Amino acid sequence: MPRRNLHLSFNVELMNLFIGMTRGVAGLPRDLAQLGYITRCIEFRFANGAGDQVHPELILSSGRLGHSLLLEWKSGPNTEEDQLRRYAGVTADSLRANAFLRVEECRQHDITVVGRAEHEERIAIGVERFNFVLLTRTDEGLRRVRNAFAVPELNEVINPVLAVDWSLVPCGFFPVDDSSELWEFAQ
Amino acid sequence: MARLLEDVMTSAYADLAENQHLEVDTNLVKTFLLEAHDAQDANHEHVFALVRDSFTPALARSHRRAQVSETDEQFFFVIEADAGDRHGPLSLFIDATNPRYWLAHSFSKTSAVDPVIKDVLLDSPKLDNAWLPVQLLERTAAGGALRGLGLAFDRRKIPDVDFDVPDAPVEFLKMQLWGNRAADVLRILREQEAFPESTTLSKVKIKQWLDGDDESFSLADVKYDGKITVRGTSFASYASMLTRIVDLYSRKIHDLEQKFRIRGRVEDNRFYLDGAPLNIRFPHPLPDLELFCESVFAGTAPFKLWGIPVQVSPSMFRVSVIDLHVIGSMTVEICPDFMRVYLAEGACGNTLIRLYTNLQHYYNSLISATDAQEELAFEF
């Protein structure tokens, strides 16, 4: 029996986790699905209110809460000022017109950066300037370490930790990405 | 064809009623529910070619003479063969009016027809029998009066426990119950202190009347592998039951394929990922993930699924699975409390229903399966 303790790449792991949490996947927290969040865009590039491009990893939205969540992974310690500035330019109109979200999903939105716990301080420097939410991946799950979401229901879900058993994170949605090994593609 | 089948059916019933046994050469009508998964929208010619290509090789091996022919009616085909042995000639009438879900009727002897169906299903990657989970058998039974049932459970196919320890699960349970009290016995066996985890319904005997007419009825044994044996006085009553089963089954297969196929698509320059895995939950944590995986994904009957399990975390195995039967693929993630099944694009819902039905019969009768909304996936 092959035994490969696969360490999913940071990006693949988060992508599968968040998609899985919106789709009621067994073994993951169901809170996001219960709040009505669905995966609306995957790696979709669109223009913000000023016409500058943003390219979030995922956009989740809940029509019920009137809220959209733009997720950006940071596997390293640094943020890019220009990238964050462009994210700050995202408006409800740009989400509706350029990312094709429904009006009711755009009443409020949050830019959320997800990084590694060991890089928290460095990433926070950039994130704080724009008042974005910062989540870190810790052994216990996802920890909200800076700022709050625009909707209280989501703050209650990640307050401050949303427990995740990382050993159960699925890999069935996106088994690989450009950093995966060849044998992983072969699988 | 209906008239012929009704004649055979009523004459067999009359023999049974009068003599309590069948006259020599008088046989019950049997129907096999078959699924031709890539014939969904096929035309008559395509289905005929599929019938011919599926049955001819198996018949050629075991019969001196065999013929597969069209009839005057579209999507109806006849197979006649003779092995020249004591089992007598074989006649099969294929009703493929639903090109994906066929009804193969026969009044040949069981010993003549069953081996042929078995061989055809072993040979053909395009055909499988329909798999009727316990819930569908119960729903079918609710359409008439339950006159008997069968139970079949065999944990030995997945031997991930020591059967000799005092609190070991039931290893094997097989039972036939006839009569009006069968449902009562079933209820008792399913009680918590009895054998709820190994009481798996494998067959229901249903009496169904036509329009409330006491004299027009069918009495059918419906098995979980899609084989139905019938007697009675009304083929119309039987046909209406078949229609209902096929309707429920085909709608479920469609539903499974819509919900559990993971499909990527690009629209308006945007990538969408549709579908979610089927979540199958075990009543108890799996004691040995590795042995479970090796047993279920060995490529052998009844699961007919093959894959090499890879341990991806201390509590999870991942298997890229090939369905050896209908040549589809899926990815399965197995953890102690649950397994997640991601059907590949184009894969057949039959794969899921076969997996689930056989887990009921070979692992635990109480396994549950849910969709993304936590709704039961195999309710009918």
Image (cartoon, helix red, strand yellow):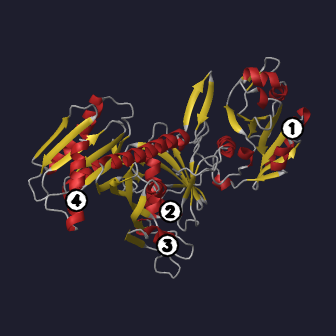
* Disc 1 with disc 3 on a shared chain: no
Q: Nearer the viewer, residue B292 or A117?
A: B292
Residue B65 location in percent, x, y? Answer: 10, 45
Residue at the extreme bottom: B166
Q: Residue at x 26, y 36 (%)?
A: B76
Circle 4 residue:
B14
Q: How many residues crowd around disc 2 within 10 Å: few (fewer than 14), some, or many (20 or more)?
A: some
Q: Nearer the viewer, residue B10 or B314?
A: B10
Residue B90 location in percent, x, y? Answer: 16, 50
Under circle 3, the secondary element is helix
Q: Give the CA separation, mark 4 to mark 3.
A: 34 Å
4 or 2: tag closer to the N-terminus:
4
Q: Give the CA separation, mark 3 to mark 2.
A: 31 Å
- Establish if A64 lies above or below B12: above
Q: Give the CA separation, mark 4 to mark 1.
A: 76 Å
Q: Nearer the viewer, mark 3 or mark 2?
A: 3
The disc numbered 3 marks a residue on which chain? B
Q: Residue at x 77, y 31 (%)?
A: A105
**Callout 2, which amino acid?**
Glu
Q: How many residues crowd around disc 1 within 10 Å: few (fewer than 14), some, or many (20 or more)?
A: some
Q: How many residues crowd around disc 3 within 10 Å: few (fewer than 14), some, or many (20 or more)?
A: some
**Callout 1, which amino acid?**
Ala
Q: Nearer the viewer, residue B255 or B233?
A: B233
